Image (spheres, grey):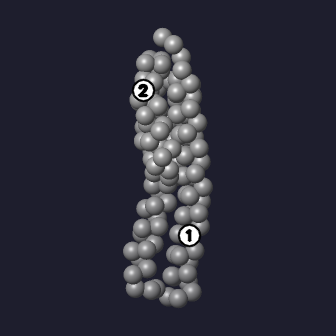
Amino acid sequence: MKKTPMPVVAGILNMVSGVLSLIAFVGLLIASIAVGWTAVDVTGWIPGMDLALSVLVILTVVSLATGVLALVGGVYAVQRKQWGWALAGSICALVPSFVLGLVAIILTALSRDEFGQS
């Protein structure tokens, strides 16, 4: 079996996308705190603000989860271990960057035979 650079490139793309997602997580976390604090402490409670805050919290959690999974999948892809985790990381890489995630999925799928069984 010949080793190609495809899993390493896919892993790097996963990790870049994961870092982007974690940066977005920090921004969304700050926005959620700011909106929640403004809505409760400064203005009382604004009608409809609960929906906006709920959406921000959901996006924050999704951003954290996909960022961590993309990073973990990227590490496994670079190591050529745990193809399933590498593919899951590539799928999660779609969330912050569709293009990076799509390329990572294709490269991970094409290089399945290069991954160890451990």
* Image vertical order of residue 96 relative to residue 71, above or below: below
Q: Quarter of the image holding residue 51?
A: bottom left
Q: Quarter of the image holding residue 53?
A: bottom left
Measured Cα–Cα span from mark 1 to mark 2: 39 Å
Write down the residue under mark 1. 31
Query: Horizontal and vertical percent for residue 8?
Result: 57, 29
Q: Quarter of the image holding residue 23?
A: bottom right
Tag 1: residue type? Ala
Tag 2: residue type? Leu
* Image vertical order of residue 93 relative to residue 81, above or below: below
Q: Secondary structure at mark 2?
A: helix
Q: Which residue occupies the extreme top position in the image?
A: 1
* Image vertical order of residue 5 relative to residue 96, above or below: above
Q: Residue at x 53, y 17 (%)?
A: 3
Return the residue nearer the eye: 78 or 97. Answer: 97
The circle drawn on residue 42 is: none
Looking at marks 1 and 2 on the same chain, the residue that comes earlier in the sequence is marked by 1
Return the residue nearer the eye: 74 or 69. Answer: 74
Write down the residue under mark 2. 110
Query: Horizontal and vertical percent for residue 104?
Result: 48, 37
Q: Is residue 83 visible?
A: yes
Badge 2: how crowded within 10 Å, few (<14), some, or many (20+)?
few
Q: Is residue 90 visible?
A: no
Foreground tag (1 vs 2) = 2
Query: Horizontal and vertical percent for residue 79?
Result: 56, 25
Q: Residue at x 56, y 32 (%)?
A: 9
Q: Secondary structure at mark 1?
A: helix
Query: Horizontal and vertical percent for residue 116?
Result: 48, 18
* Image vertical order of residue 77 relative to residue 88, above or below: above
